[in-house]
């Protein structure tokens, strides 16, 4: 009987993680994702890293934000074909149209009649983003 433990991860990892695992005396089973697998894997990784930012304490928050940054960079260029400048320009346009988050506004509710035909879901004045 062996004391060997097997942990199944099934997730995208940084490029050096398999080597780090090997350096710790363990064996990593990895594969290179096919092109069509990359976008969903990066989106799942973005969710994972965002959850880690949410649960991080002050001492680890910066590192978790760095992970989110790294995933966004890979998502932007490798998976979607945008440049960092493209994203920054789009962010500036959106900030000019809708503002940023500097005022710390929390939307509790919206009341009133909304014309469904004139305001597509998620884009009308009552649809925050």
Image (cartoon, rainbow, N blue to C red):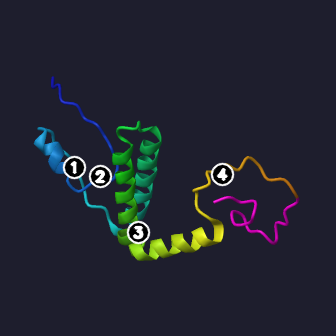
Q: Are marks 1 and 2 in contact (CB under 8 Å)?
A: yes
Sequence-wise first label, 3 or 2: 2
* Residue sitting at x 41%, y 38%: 56
The answer for how far apart the CA atoms under marks 2 and 4 are is 35 Å
Q: Are marks 4 and 3 in contact (CB under 8 Å)?
A: no
The answer for how far apart the CA atoms under marks 4 and 3 are is 28 Å
> Which residue position is annotated with label 2?
13
The residue nearer to you, when weighing 21 against 77, is: 77
Q: Secondary structure at mark 1?
A: helix
Q: Secondary structure at mark 2?
A: loop
Q: Nearer the viewer, mark 4 or mark 1?
A: 4
The residue nearer to you, when weighing 61 against 115, is: 61
Main SS of residues in magenta: loop
Relative vertical location of residue 88 with respect to residue 122 in this rendering, above or below: below
Sequence-wise first label, 4 or 3: 3
The answer for how far apart the CA atoms under marks 1 and 3 are is 22 Å
| Magenta range | 113-129
> Which residue position is annotated with label 3?
76
> Which residue position is annotated with label 1?
17
Is 52 left, or right, of 12 in this rendering?
A: right
Quadrant housing the N terminus: top left
Sequence-wise first label, 2 or 4: 2
Instruction: Pinpoint residue 6: horizontal percent, then vertical percent.
Output: 25, 35
The residue nearer to you, when weighing 86 against 121, is: 86
Examine the image and state in which quarter residue 75 appears.
bottom left
Is 4 left, or right, of 50 in this rendering?
A: left
Q: Nearer the viewer, mark 4 or mark 3?
A: 4
Relative vertical location of residue 121 with respect to residue 49 in this rendering, above or below: below
> Which residue position is annotated with label 4?
105
Relative vertical location of residue 88 with respect to residue 107 in this rendering, above or below: below
Quadrant housing the C terminus: bottom right
């Amino acid at each position: 009987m062996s004391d060997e433990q097997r942990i199944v991860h099934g997730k995208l990892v940084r490029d050096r993680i398999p080597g780090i695992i090997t350096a710790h005396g363990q064996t990593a089973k990895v594969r290179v994702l096919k092109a069509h697998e990359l976008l969903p894997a990066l989106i799942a990784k973005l969710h994972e890293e965002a959850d880690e930012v949410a649960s991080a304490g002050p001492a680890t928050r910066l590192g978790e934000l760095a992970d989110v940054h790294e995933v966004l960079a890979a998502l932007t260029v490798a998976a979607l074909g945008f440049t960092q400048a493209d994203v920054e320009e789009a962010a500036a346009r959106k900030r000019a149209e809708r503002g940023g988050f500097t005022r710390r506004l929390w939307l509790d509710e919206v009341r009133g009649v909304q014309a469904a035909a004139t305001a597509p879901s998620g884009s009308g004045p009552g649809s925050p983003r």
